[in-house]
Amino acid sequence: MPDPTRPLVLLTRPEPGASRTAARLTELGFCPILAPALVIRTLPTSLPDRTRLQALLVTSANALLALPPPWHAHPLFTVGTTTAAQARANGFSYIHNADADATALVALVTKTCRPADGALLQLSGSGQGQDLTHALRAASFRVIRRAVYAASPAPSLPDTAKTALAEGNIAHALFFSAATARVFLRLVRHAGLLEQLRTIEAITIGPPARMALEAAAWRRIRVATRPTQDAMLACLP
């Protein structure tokens, strides 16, 4: 049950990231209402010979589960602090964190690595990460890309989220991607709760998520100053 003494924040991030963000919200004095818009499932994949790779690239913590312990000694490049922290918890030893977005990750890789030193293994979600691959290949790197997870739309909103929306108890909602924003609006529309969004301030990780949310009327839509979880949480009162 939601804690009525704490401000309610709707969290649309899928698991396993949702639980980690929910814990941060609780630490900050908020009551998270989980409403994952996507369901993450691991895909079977074959990994290349790791002895021929100079580094690994991930843009989401969802990709880390595809790398068993023997891979943890390889240099790992992450797009953000949350993914870097999860990688450290998983046992990775050499982590380079771009602490921003895919553009910053490309800049960090090109500054740190040399094309002649071996291929890069990029692990991403199905249908994601092509821009990162193209940018690194344009910089003369050999990039091996593997899709190791897929994100599917959630079938419906959880009952707890429906109740909190219907009663008008939610003041803020967090959106970590354009995909979650689009699916969330579809689920809200199906639940007949679209009008309830007018009293909610949406906080997004970047402009693409904001554009997706503009299909509905909100009290306000804010874009975090940087594409990180910490910057999003800093937007909360």
Image (tube, grey):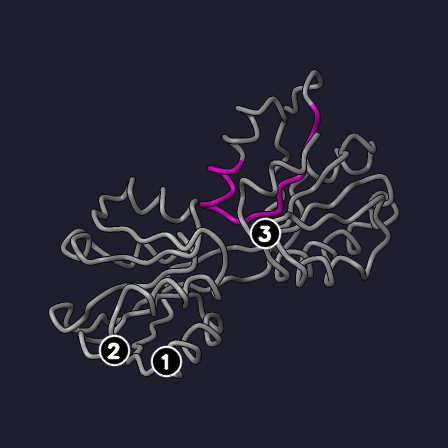
In front of the other: 47 or 159: 47
Q: Amino acid at mark 3?
A: Phe
Is residue 81 shown left or right of residue 169? left
Tag 2 or tag 1, which sits nearer the N-term? 2
User: Which SS class for mark 2?
Assistant: helix
Q: Residue at x 28, y 70 (%)?
A: 121
Whether label 1 touches label 3, CB < 8 Å: no
Query: Residue under circle 1?
Result: 139
Q: Residues within 10 Å of mark 1 (few under 14, many from 20)?
A: few
Residue 134 placement (x, y as % from top left): 43, 80
Distance of mark 2 from mark 3, alpha carbons?
32 Å
Residue 128 placement (x, y as % from top left): 48, 70
Q: How many marks?
A: 3
In the rendering, which numbered label is found on residue 115?
2
Which quarter of the rendered picture does the C terminus lie within? top right
Which residues lie in the magenta part? 7-21
Which quarter of the rendered picture does the N terminus lie within? top right
